[in-house]
Image: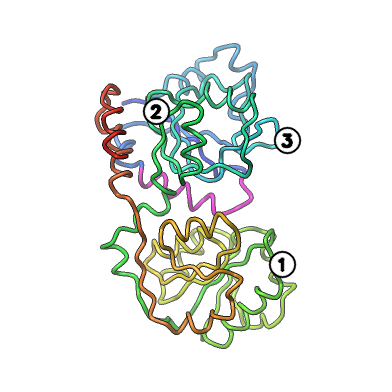
Amino acid sequence: MDNIVLLDTSVGSLNKGDDIIMKCVREHLTEITKEDYVLTLPTHLAPFHWYQVVRGSNRVKLYSNAKYKFVGGSNLLTMDMLTHFPQWNINLFNYQPLKGSILVGVGAGKGTKIKRYTKMLYKKVLSHDYMHSVRDERTKSFVEDMGLKAINTGCATLWSLTPDFCLQIPKHKATSVVFTLTFHARHKESDQLLINVLQKNYEKIYFWIQDKEDLHYFHTLDNIEGIQIVSPTLAAYEKILSQDIDYIGTRLHGGIYAMRHKKRAIIIGIDERARGMGETYNLNQLDRREMSQLETTIHSAITTDVKLDLKRINTWLQQFRQVNTSDIELLFRGAQ
């Protein structure tokens, strides 16, 4: 039995969307990790102090010598690792035990030009043997520009949404709805319209808190009487999703997670990331600038038909099914 390290982006995160991502990452890595021992380390928090690395303790060596080191998705990569709080909290003094890390559905944050120090650090910590699974074409170019191999598999949260699975998602309106808001991208006029339309068209309305500040923002809006608050945990959200219910809201991964529970979802596109993923993967998305169409959309027959490249996902997984790394380049070429 070998050790496998899973770098967890949900530890220390302020957003329950990272819990969704990591649950999906764990699920889709099961076939690779099921015979081995999985060790977990955080990304948002520093995994080691520099003196632990320098001392070369046996505990650090356990992580360093792991068979694989997988890094869970989210906007992990950045253009400047000298920022005050990078999503991946590593530096030149503590990264060594994580050398050879492999990305799983990871995206890159804002910016167009990577800093010299950041590029050097990523080239040191990321695997040069395995191809990395990235969320989009922009991140693919970002990784390839560093001389590494990457394949666009999309976010791991999408991987279960195959054509057969999508056929099981209802097309028509439910009697209840769960919705989300996004405090850091708030727009009172649009968000108030969302609530008003839901109050008019659904018998029961639930509000799931994906970020603590979402609740504070919710209480600044009107017409919220009778709306039931759902605790900010995946267990509470899953319980709500076990009933006949629609999802409508501005939280992208809240919507995708609802789809994974075979619920009809209308994702409100509020930024370029959500709009880009919506267009690329054919998510049922309504742009915030078109909120006047929400009521009509709710009463329409909605077909869920997520456009996944299953060949790419399988190609990325296949490199761990056969451990011979000399074959990885052939697999990579076949997926392009």
Q: Does the magenta stretch include residue 84?
A: no
Q: Which of marks 1 and 2 precedes in the sequence?
A: 2
Q: Tell me the SS state at disc 1.
A: helix
Quarter-of-image position of residue 321 = top left
Q: Name the residue under label 3.
A: 84
Q: Which of 84 and 154 is in front in this view?
A: 154
Percent position (x, y) of residue 324? 26, 23
Quarter of image, res 193:
bottom right
Query: Dot 1, how many residues are within 10 Å of its Cα: few (below 14), some (14-19), or many (20+)?
Result: some
Q: Position of residue 18 (x, y in %)?
A: 54, 49
Tell me the residue that label 1 is attached to: 217
Q: Do the residues labelled 3 and 1 touch (CB within 8 Å)?
A: no
Mark 2, residue position: 68
Amino acid type of disc 3? His
> Which segment did they paint magenta?
13-28
Q: Which of the pair 303/257 is nearer the observer? A: 303
Residue at 58 percent of width and 16 percent of height: 53
Q: In the orientation shown, which residue stands out farthest toward the right?
A: 220
Where residue 222 sits, quadrant-wise, is bottom right
For the N terminus, the image quarter is top left
Q: Is mark 3 on a helix, strand or loop?
A: loop
Q: Distance between the residues labelled 3 and 2?
A: 29 Å
Residue at the location (51% across, 61% down)?
A: 254
Chain-order first, disc 3 or disc 2: 2
Q: How crowded is mark 3: few (under 14 residues within 10 Å), some or many (20 or more)?
A: few
| Residue type indicated by callout 1 | Tyr
Amino acid type for the residue under numbered disc 2 = Tyr
- Work out how far the residue at label 3 is from the one at label 1, CA to CA, in angstroms: 26 Å
